[in-house]
């Protein structure tokens, strides 16, 4: 799996004037080319069994939109929203479903689309919650995984990038609901996250 480029890079203008934004972690071009690759892999793997994409709101909305357009199969969509208790920049692992799925998962090939895996607690909860609904298969595609942070055994079928364990924003990810619309992923302040 390609890691993001590790030489320190600044965010592009005009965002470089925002003192709350730190180093560029994944650029717009890197996102586009890696998502094209993920789409190809998913298209090949699910050729005989088009998946039901389950996006985890809100963070995954942008990744879900781009990934879905890179998959050349008649996919279906559903979304769920979860809230995890904890501080603004760290999860406690206690997860609450804020919006449940509309569709029945029975006998469906479910591909969960997640923005970022940090401790893995959210995903481990989601996996257990979705498995009892009897899908034919259940896999996860995560755009970002923080190196050395995953505490819970989580089986990630597809991963976009491994990134350093700092708090990041952009491309769907927020800090207090801001920065989701940045077209790249960058560090937020110099916030060491763990
Ligand atoms: P986990 O349960 O520790 O794996 O945390 C996963 C969830 O926390 C993600 O789905 C995000 O919503 C949020 N999260 C974790 N790290 C970050 C980050 O660096 N920026 C923004 N949100 C994050
Ligand atoms: Mg999330």
Image: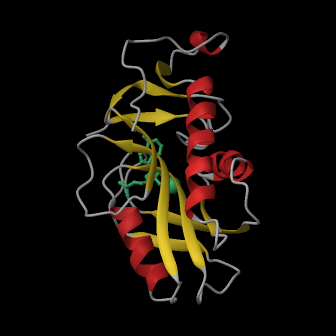
Q: Is residue 173 left or right of residue 187?
A: right
Which quadrant of the figure has residue 192? top left
> Foreground: 10 or 7?
7
Residue 74 lies left or right of residue 36; in this view the side is: right
**Is 124 above or below relative to 129?**
above
Q: Quadrant location of the N terminus?
A: top left
Q: At 56% from the left edge and 27% from the top edge, which residue is drawn?
A: 30
Question: Is residue 162 found left or right of 103 in the rendered image?
Answer: left
Image check: 155 left or right of 74? Answer: left
Considering only vertical position in the picture, is 88 above or below 24? below
Image location of residue 175, percent across then percent down = 52, 39
Q: Nearer the viewer, residue 45 or 66?
A: 45
Q: Which quadrant: the C terminus? A: top left
Q: Residue at x 50, y 56 (%)?
A: 141
Colour scheme of the rendered structure: secondary structure
Q: Position of residue 116 (x, y in %)?
A: 46, 48
Residue 118, horizontal then vertical, whole percent: 35, 49
């Amino acid at each position: 799996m390609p890691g993001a480029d590790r030489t320190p890079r600044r965010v592009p203008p005009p965002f470089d004037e925002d003192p709350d934004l730190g180093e560029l972690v994944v650029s717009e071009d890197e996102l586009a080319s890696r998502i094209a690759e993920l789409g190809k892999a998913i298209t090949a793997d699910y050729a005989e069994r088009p998946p039901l994409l389950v996006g985890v709101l809100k963070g995954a909305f942008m990744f879900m939109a781009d990934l879905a357009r890179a998959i050349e199969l008649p996919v279906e969509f559903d979304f769920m929203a979860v809230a995890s208790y904890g501080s603004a920049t760290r999860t406690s692992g206690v997860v609450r479903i804020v919006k449940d799925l509309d569709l029945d998962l029975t006998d469906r090939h479910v591909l969960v689309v997640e923005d970022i895996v940090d401790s893995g607690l959210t995903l481990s909860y989601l996996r257990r919650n979705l498995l009892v609904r009897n899908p034919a298969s259940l896999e996860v595609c995560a755009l970002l995984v923080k190196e050395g942070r995953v505490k819970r055994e989580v089986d990630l079928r597809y991963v976009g990038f491994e990134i350093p364990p700092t708090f990041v924003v952009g491309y769907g990810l927020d800090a207090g609901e801001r920065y989701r619309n940045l077209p790249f992923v960058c560090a937020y302040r110099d916030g060491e996250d763990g």
